[in-house]
Each structure stands twice: as C-alpha cells, then as structure tokens.
Amino acid sequence: MTSPAPTPQELLKIAIEVARDAAGTAHRMRTEGVSVAATKSTVTDVVTAADRAVERQVLDALATLRPDDSVLGEEYGGAAAGGPGSGVRWIVDPIDGTVNYLYGLPHSAVSLAAEVDGTVVAGVVRNISTGDEWTATAGGGAWRGGTRLRCSTETDLGQALVATGFGYDPRRRAHQARVVADLIPHVRDIRRLGAAAIDLCYAAEGRVDAYYEKGLAAWDLAAGGLVAHEAGLRVDGLRGVPAGPDMVVAAPPALFEPLHARLADLDASGGP
Ligand code: LIP
C-alpha cells in the first residue's frame, strides 16, 4: 500500500529545513571567497563552485529525507526518484541571483519548491545574505517570518514600481531593453534587482507593485511564484499562455490587465 501523499505543510517543513542548511553553506562559501567555475549559455551566464555544492547538498538531503521523490535542479537537471516515485517533485535553484552572489550584492537566494502531481504546493525562498525567508503553501497563504503577506493595492499603472530582469543572451537583452525603454514612461519606475525568486517575493509583500520577466526557468519561478500567488498577485503569461519561459507577469488584479496590455503591445514575450 502506497503511503499517503504528504501535506503541503509537511513538505514546507522539509523545504525550510533543507533551504536553511543550503543557504548557510552558500553564505559560508561566499565569505570564504567565490569565483567563476564555468559559464553556461553565454560568457556572462556564470556558475560558481557554490552553485554546484549547494545543489548537491540539497539533492543529498532530499534523497535522505524523501528517497521516493524526484528532483529538478538548475545545475544537475532532473534526478529521478530513488524508488517507484511518490508523485512529489522538488524544484531547486541553489543560488538564484548568481551574478549578485558572485559580486557580493545582498540579493541572492536559495529557492526550493515541492510539486505534487505537477502542481506546486509548497515553497521557500531564503535570502542568502540577509536571512529573509518567504514561504507559502497552496491555499495556506504567503508569509515572511510570522507576517502574512498581502500584495500592493495600487490601481494606477503610472504609479506602479515595476521590477524586471534581463537574460544572458545579448540579442534577447537588446529586445528586453527596447521593451523596458517603451514601458518606463508609463510606470512610476523600474527596478532590476537580479534575482527572480526574490523579485516575486518583493511583489508578494508590496516592496514592488509588480514584476515581469521573459526567460525564467522552472527553478526561478516555482517557489517565488507560489509566494506571489498566495499573496494575492495574479501570476500569468501573455495572451493566455501560462507563466513560464516566454513570460511571467506577477501583478495585483487591478494592475494586471494594464501591464499585460502594454507588454503584449510591446511583444515582450517575443524576440530571441
Ligand atoms: C537570474 C534570475 C534573474 C534574471 C537573471 C538570472 P540566475 O537567475 O533570477 O531574474 O534577470 O538574468 O537569470 O541565473 O542567477 O539563477
């Protein structure tokens, strides 16, 4: 008889334990000094020894705690379950905001989420430098520490502080720069902070009013996207496409349509 599926709260407890240990390792390695270990899609898409060590630590911890679960990680890809499979898949970005981490800027995070049968039900994002920790469970709300998070109530796009990010491919960056140049006169201002998972959590607590970005991977989006959704943000793509690599738009209900309209008009999900 297969064991009952774990509850979102049980999965979140494991996620928090694993993410805190992982963030501790990342912080220690940063203080010891980090350098580029390799590059990936382009010469600016860097990976450090810490990215690899932290993801390995997460994989080993989950293999011990949840041996029948599968895992998808940025550095080592997909790891099948040790056994028949439990229906639970963990999605990990060991260091989201790697360039910030490399430069010592305090805006990078361990992001860890749990999916059950393809739906993210629990997630944690932990800032490696500050220890800020955002959590969410499906239907259980979004939290930072003991504070329940509520997104911005801004209704005027012209008064909205909007976070975004750019890819590593110079051709994509040129397209994204054109989009943000055309958008910026129509919003309060733009913030480019460099870690999608934290950007989504900032939107969840109203430190920015909205966020959008083209090019996010599942590990960038999984945990932060749940936090944002549970804080009341609409998290979606453009023109009916779900949030994903083509586009993620996270905005309060009153801002989603006007922001979506401008991004769609600017073909923000297009380009290379
Ligand atoms: C980063 C994202 C960020 C994006 C960066 C980069 P990484 O992820 O979190 O939003 O703008 O270009 O992709 O590469 O640090 O894991």
Image (cartoon, rainbow, N blue to C red):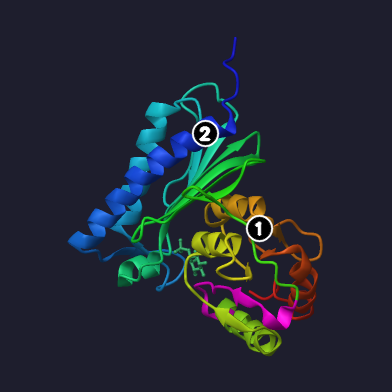
Name the image quarter holding residue 2.
top right
The mark nearer the N terminus, 2 or 1, is 2
Query: Could you tell me if residue 56 is visible in this image?
Result: no
Q: Residue furthest front?
A: 147
* Image x and y of residue 25, in percent: 28, 49
Up the image or down, 66 lies above or below 127; here it is above
**Tag 2's secondary structure?**
helix
The residue that disc 2 covers is 11
Identify the residue shown where x is 52% and y is 33%: 11
Q: Residue furthest top?
A: 1
Q: Amino acid at mark 1?
A: Gly
Residue 145, x across and y down, in percent? 46, 49
- Identity of the residue drawn at 71% across and 86% down: 186
Which residue is tagged 1?
A: 244
Q: Specify whether residue 165 is painted magenta.
A: yes
- State the extent of the magenta-drawn residues as a range: 156-171
Task: Classify residue 198 as left or right of residue 251.
Answer: left
Q: Quadrant of residue 251?
A: bottom right
Query: Is residue 62 depicted above or below 150 in this figure?
Result: above
Q: Residue at x 34, y 46 (%)?
A: 22
Callout 1 secondary element: loop
Q: Which of the pair 253/5 is nearer the observer?
A: 253
Q: Amino acid at mark 2?
A: Leu
Query: From where the camera sits, is residue 268 visible?
Result: yes
